[in-house]
């Protein structure tokens, strides 16, 4: 077996490329570029929602939604089928194949919205353990009920947080899409995990986690069941990967105790994110779990990705354009220094510091 040639101090200074074994793509790391002057677009810092209830919010309890329905006066989590869904459970059949160049097919889907709590201003970072447990329980329940539909191959849980991520409503919520074909990212990860397993007779993410626990410099936080780290191949400035310590493939396999610990690690991470620039930190996050096609999929290891767009301050955003759009993604601050920033950010939320 070849020894990895890791010389960390050099990697912090020299441009190089790193490999992402999960989706098999490279990222260019350019640590020498962080000193360049910034004359690009500056965003407004994200605002903190101030009120527990907003009469104009279509997700708050009792309020009317855009589609005409009215929310019940719910008191914990609440889900509904998206009023403007991206996919439909029973669309007309589509089957196009012209010279293998014009190809289209049917995609069935259920698109749901899950409100984390009735509170308009209560984010994951500031929820109690009991409230977080309700969110995790809802994810498990949705994964099970949607995943058990015979035509559903994959359940994607994801959260877009913040205006600059395109979130249309600040009320803390996520979306759940259950679809009839394995999506692009899951397909890539499926192939990588399968082939790694065939070659090494072990799990890609179990082996990766073991390596990272030895190196330590990219670990952000951990508890008894989960570890959060900035992956070696991270593209986004403060990108993180949340990995379960135990090898299992889906939300439905979470032990009761692990449900609580998942809520705990999500809170620890999002507090750190908010603390980095002392703003509600925008991100897209989502869980990757095994397909629900009736197969066992022992190669799959449950994990979550966080992709935050902020770069060097609350008002400077990273854009994937130019070389990144046409060639290879590129980052300036190294994954190691991003992990150090997140470790230093601490686990007392900046809005709670005076009361702590
Ligand atoms: Zn609301
Ligand atoms: Zn594993
Ligand atoms: Zn993944």
Image: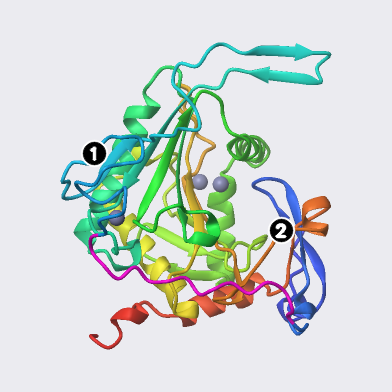
Determine the secondary structure under disc 2. Answer: loop
Determine the secondary structure under disc 1. Answer: loop
The residue at the point 23 percent across, 85 percent down is: 355
Relative to 139, residue 55 above or below: below
Report whether residue 191 is seen.
Answer: yes
How is the structure coloured here?
rainbow
Residue 7 coordinates in the image, percent (x, y): 75, 75
Give yes or no for residue 46 being in the magenta stretch.
yes
Front residue of 248 and 97: 97
Report whether residue 1 is seen.
Answer: no
Is 294 positioned to the left or the right of 129 in the image? right
Q: Main secondary structure of the magenta part?
A: loop
Is 117 positioned to the left or the right of 173 in the image? left
Give the residues in magenta. Answer: 38-53
Viewport quadrant of the N terminus: bottom right
Viewport quadrant of the C terminus: bottom left
Query: Pointer 1: what residue?
Result: 70
- What numbered label is drawn on residue 147? none
- What numbered label is drawn on residue 320? 2
User: Badge 2, how many Cα within 10 Å: few under 14, some, many 20+?
Assistant: some
Is ligand 1 less than 8 Å from the beta carbon at label 1? no
């Amino acid at each position: 077996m070849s020894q990895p040639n890791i010389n960390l101090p050099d990697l912090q200074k020299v441009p190089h490329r790193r490999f992402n074994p999960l989706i098999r793509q490279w990222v260019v790391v350019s640590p020498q570029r962080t000193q360049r002057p910034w004359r690009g677009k500056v965003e407004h810092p994200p605002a903190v929602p101030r009120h527990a209830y907003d009469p104009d919010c279509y997700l708050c309890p009792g309020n009317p939604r855009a589609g005409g329905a009215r929310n019940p006066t719910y008191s914990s989590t609440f889900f509904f089928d998206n009023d403007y869904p991206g996919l439909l459970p029973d669309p007309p059949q589509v089957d196009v194949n012209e010279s293998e160049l014009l190809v289209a097919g049917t995609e069935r889907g259920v698109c749901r919205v899950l409100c984390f709590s009735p509170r308009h201003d209560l984010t994951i970072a500031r929820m109690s353990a009991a409230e977080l447990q309700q969110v995790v329980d809802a994810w498990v329940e949705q994964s099970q009920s949607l995943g058990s539909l015979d035509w559903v191959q994959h359940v994607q849980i994801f959260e877009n947080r913040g205006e600059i991520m395109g979130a249309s409503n600040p009320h803390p919520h996520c979306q759940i899409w259950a679809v009839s074909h394995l999506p692009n990212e899951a397909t890539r990860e499926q192939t990588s995990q399968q082939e790694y397993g065939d070659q090494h007779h072990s799990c890609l993410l179990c082996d990766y986690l073991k390596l990272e626990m030895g190196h330590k410099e990219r670990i952000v936080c951990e508890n008894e069941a989960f570890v959060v780290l900035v992956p070696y191949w991270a593209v986004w400035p403060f990108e993180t990967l949340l990995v379960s310590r135990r090898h299992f493939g889906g939300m439905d396999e979470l032990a009761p105790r692990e449900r609580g610990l998942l809520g705990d690690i999500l809170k620890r991470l999002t507090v750190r994110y908010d603390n980095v620039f002392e703003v509600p930190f925008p991100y897209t996050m989502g869980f990757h779990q095994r397909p629900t096609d009736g197969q066992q999929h022992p190669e799959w290891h449950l994990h979550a990705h966080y992709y935050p767009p902020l770069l060097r301050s609350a008002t400077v955003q990273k854009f994937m354009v130019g070389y990144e759009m046409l060639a290879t993604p590129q980052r300036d601050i190294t994954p190691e220094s991003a992990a150090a920033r997140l470790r230093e950010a601490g686990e007392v939320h900046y809005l709670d510091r005076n009361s702590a």
